[in-house]
Amino acid sequence: TSPAGPLSPWMDRNNILPGEKWHAEIQQAICECDFGLLMVSPEFLASRYILDHELQQLLEKPMVVPVLIEPILHWGPLANFQVFRELVTGHAFSQSRNKRTFAIELVRRIEALVEKVATK
């Protein structure tokens, strides 16, 4: 939906039904989305499927928020993107002492991004 409209979350595990062709469903969802929330971990950046079929398309969206879930050493295609992490320490979510505060600040930053894009 548009930045000013309601969000319709989509996640492969929840939205792809048994018997559907999962690759086609994922590609269609990426094409139709305006916003990507990327949960970044070493496994995320090591996934050939994510790197070959998802990430580049998502990084071209008007709004994409990479969130550091676990520490990583090599940023790869995310090297030029501001990645959300704990503001004071720079820690990943898994290292954060206050996960509630991490989540609340993430929501605030997403709201600020949506507002910024909506006013352009």
Image (cartoon, rainbow, N blue to C red):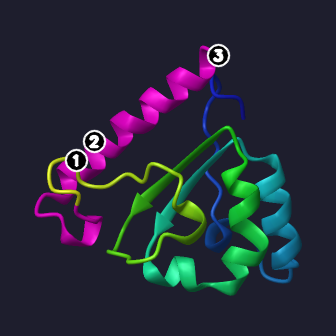
Q: How far separated are the C-alphas under marks 2 and 3?
A: 23 Å
Query: Which comes before the other along the chain, label 3 or label 1?
Result: 1
Q: Amino acid at mark 3?
A: Lys
Q: Earlier in the sequence, mark 2 or mark 3?
A: 2
Mark 2, secondary structure of its residue: helix
In this rendering, the answer to whether 99 lies above or below 94 is above
Please state the extent of the stretch shown in magenta in the rendering: 91-120
Residue 110 as seen in the image, left or right of residue 77: left
Ranked by sequence position, the earlier of labels 1 and 2 is 1
- What residue is pinned by disc 1? 87
Q: Report the number of discs.
A: 3
- Above or below, 43 against 3 in this view is below
Label 1, secondary structure: give it. Answer: loop
Q: Position of residue 86 (x, y in %)?
A: 23, 54
Type of amino acid at the residue the image marks with label 2: Glu
Q: Which residue lies under the disc numbered 3?
A: 120
Residue 112: say if magenta.
yes
Q: Is residue 61 above or below residue 78?
A: above
Residue 5 in picture, x, y percent from top left: 65, 26
Separation of residues labelled 1 and 2 (CA atoms)? 8 Å
Judging depth in this view, the residue of 62 and 2 nearest the camera is 62
Q: Nearer the viewer, mark 2 or mark 3?
A: 3
Disc 1 + disc 2, Cβ < 8 Å: yes
Q: Main secondary structure of the magenta part?
A: helix
Quick check: 43 left or right of 13? left
> Is residue 56 part of the magenta span, yes or no?
no
Q: Which residue is mark 2?
A: 105
Q: Amino acid at mark 1?
A: Leu
Of 98 and 74, the residue lying toward us: 74
Q: Quick one: 93 or 100, which is closer to the camera?
A: 93
Question: Measuring 60% from the left and 14% from the top, which residue is drawn there?
Answer: 119
Name the residue rendered at 72%, 35% in the picture.
1
